[in-house]
Each structure stands twice: as C-alpha cells, then as structure tokens.
Amino acid sequence: MKEFPYDIHSKASIIAYAKELIHQTLRLKCKEVLEPEKIKNKGNFGQILEQYYFLYKPNSNSEPDFKEVGLELKASPIKKLKKLHYVSKERLVLNIINFMEVAEQNFDNSSFWKKNKNLLLIFYLHELEKNFLDYKIEIADEWSFPDIDLEIIKNDWEIITNKIKNGKAHELSEGDTLYLGACTKGSKGGNLREQPYAQIKAKQRAYSLKQGYVNHIIASLSGKNPIYGKVISSLELVKSSSLEEIVVSKFQFYYGKTIEEILKLLNISINKKAKNFYANLSKAILGIELNKEIEEFSKADIIVKTVRLKENNLPAEDLSFPVFKYTEIISQEWEESDIKDILEHKFLFVFFKFEKEQLVLKKVKFWNMPYQDINEIQKVWERTKHVIISGEIVKDVKVDKNGKKIRVTNFPSKKFSSVSHVRPHALNANDVIELPIKDKMTQAEKYTKHCFWLNNSYVKQIYLQD
C-alpha cells in the first residue's frame, strides 16, 4: 500500500499537511519536480501540487480527491492589492457539467455536490515575472458553504439543470445565476458536447464559483472580511424567497415616489451631486449602511445600473461599459474578451422616470443578457477588432458650422446593431490611449478612448419587459 506524508483517513491530518505550504513555494516543497524530465508537459500549478506534494496522480474522477474524507483539492491564483489584502485573479473552476447525466440528478445526489461539498483550497500569489514553481502560497484551508450561501447555490444549480432539461444547454450563461456559475471549459471557450434534449451541440461547461464569491472565501479564510451589510438576514428568509424577490420587494415600497419623497421616508440625507448618489440611495432602500458593501451583490458580482427614463420610456442616455484598450482588444478572442465577461454578469437595473420634471422610481429588474443578444454583440466586437487591426478607424473628417473638425469612424454605430454600438467615452477628444496600429487617414498613434454602449432603445425594451 502506498505511503503518504499524511493520514488519508483523517481530514485534520490532510489539512495540517496542506497548511505546511503557507509562505512556501512548489520549488521548495516539491524537490522531485525540479528534475527537468519530470516537469516537462506536466501541466499547471494544481497538477504539480497534486502529483508532487500530495502524491496522487491528477484525475477527472467524480469522487473528491481525498475520497476517504470527502475533501476536494483546488488551487487558485490570487492578486495582492495596494491595501495589502488579496483578491481572486479569476473564478474558481470546479467539475465539468455532464449534460447527459445532470438532468437525471437532484442536488443532494448530484456530481457537483458529491465532489465539492467540502473543499481544501490552496491560494497562491500569481506574479507574471515568476515561474509558477516560485509562486508563494498564501492561504491553505478548508471551506464548507455556510447555510445561507448553500441555499443560493442550490437554487443556482437548479437553474443550470432546468436550462439543460429544457434543451438550452447551448444558451447557458454565467449571468443566469448568483454564486454558482456554468463557465465555458476547453479550447477557445469550450469544446462542443451533445446535450440530451436538443440536437444542437453545446459548449463544454464546468461548475464554477463566481469571482466575487471567491473573494469572499479569501477574505474569510485570511480573517480580513470587508465591512458588509446583508440583504438576507436569516436562513428562513432565503428558503422562502429568492435573493431577487427579496431585493425587489424592498424597492417596491418606494415605487411611484420621487427621490425627495424616498429620502424623506428613509429619513436620511445623501449628497445628490455625489457620483455615488444612486448607489447610496439603493443601499439605503435595501437597509444597508452607506459605509458598507452589499454582501450578496459582492458575492454574486451583480452590476447595478441606474437608468433615467424620459416620459416616452426611452432612456435619456445610452448605457456605457468600461473603456477598452485598443492594444488589448486585438489580442483577445471573443470567448475571453472583457466585454463578453461583463455581459455574462447578472445586472440589477434601477429605473427612474422623469414625471413633471421630477425623477420617480418606477421599478427595479434583475436581468442578464439573452444568448442571442450576446451573439449580436459578438458581431459588434468583431467589427471593432477588425477596424483597429486594419488601421482604418477614421473614415472621414468633416467640418461643422462652427469650423470644428469632426472625425467620422468606421466603428459600428447604432445602424450596425439594434443592441450595441461603439463610440467615445472620454473627457474630450484629447483624452487618448495608444493604438497598436497607426490610423491610416490621420496617422495618429493614439486615439480618443472608446467603449461599447447598449443602445437606449434596447434598454427601453428591458424596462418594458415584465
């Protein structure tokens, strides 16, 4: 029988052995791996950790890695922020979703729960300039899901499973769920796999914990939890209502009220000129102190967007996303692109409407972008990438009636797509960033900052949906 440097029948022994890795590196703790012939084609950090520290061969078994004690090992990279605390570099990928089997399972006997009920997590500091053998391990500990989180994860699992049962495995999106996602897994964003209730093949996917949830785990294990306020106060509450239902119910009391009326009812004073006014107003409505983060929103990576509607229900403005870097977008593939990652989040839209020149709260809506609309934005993204690579950003330069030069670009406009377009998102025309290829018409090596926008007509349709 093979001997291990820990007792395979004792969870405490395995965890204690794992903790010997803290402040160490694989190079220091796995001496055998330094032999060149042994590290060649041996894979990533996690595989080396398994094979040369815990001394078992990497596998894709449905059982936990330490099956005798029901403990699954996962290694994941972290980054250090300026405030000297750690955050996750990425989501935590768990086991592959077997489309053909999961539809016949319930949560308690599911492959997900059998494998991931109890996790042994190893977090290492990712530093680009270093060989992965020299990444320092900062956290090693056990993680079991708290009861309230587990209720949300169960609901997430049901949402994923029901989509597969409905023949829509190809339409799975991480925006469907809160803490537990279904991320693409494999080359170029997912190898194609058969699904049981539809002929169309679906991208291979794996269960994953959202990056925000992983940040929560890291903070909990390191003893550096942010100051949180909770929307869900008890296990009984989340068992009777979903997070979305609880949030909407808190806002509903204020529907039809002006901002002034809401502030008066809440008995608070918030600086209306502050950039975070609407974020603070939403916190106050949810009963969260202004100096605290909303725990459930942070864990679920929920993006909150406040929209001001005109009297005809058309948003006063298009909806912007972060500025993209020209030098980065040309080296990305769609599946790994920044904008696709953003669009696969869950959003909370807070809609205010101008009525008699006052803003009135009309409704809030949880939303994630439908599969076909994400495909539409892919076309916008691909066109944008092509324009940058071709060096043909500027199509024409016109002069307006005031003698000001106006550049007309080849970036996709609202005429190109009913969903999204690309235009400037900058302080002024001189707020520029570097181009990877010089613009042919203007010879510019830098260009005004741009971003992707959702068309206001598209956002109007989100508002009008039940």
Image (spheres, rainbow, N blue to C red):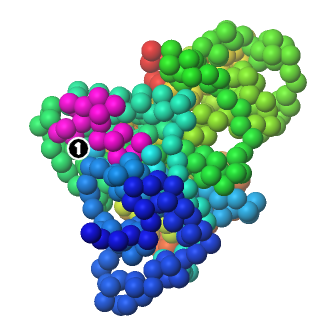
x then y, percent, for residue 285: 72, 21
Which residue is depicted at the point 32% across and 85% down?
A: 38
Q: Quadrant of the C terminus?
A: top left
Instruction: Give the amino acid at mark 1.
Output: Asn
Magenta stretch secondary structure, dominant = helix
Which residue is depicted at the point 51% across and 26% down?
A: 366
Judging by the rendered image, the residue that carries numbered circle 1 is 98
Q: Quadrant of the N terminus?
A: bottom left
x then y, percent, for residue 81: 69, 62
- Residue 459 vertical placement versus 438 (above, below): above
Whether residue 154 appears in magenta in the rendering, the answer is no
Residue most toward the bottom? 36
**Residue stretch in magenta:** 99-117
Query: Going by the image, does 346 lie left or right of 255?
Result: left
Which residue is depicted at the point 30% across and 36% down?
A: 110
x then y, percent, for residue 306: 64, 30
Q: In this orientation, which residue lies closer to the viewer: 227 or 192?
A: 227
Q: Quadrant of residue 280?
A: top right
Which residue is depicted at the point 37% across and 33% down?
A: 157
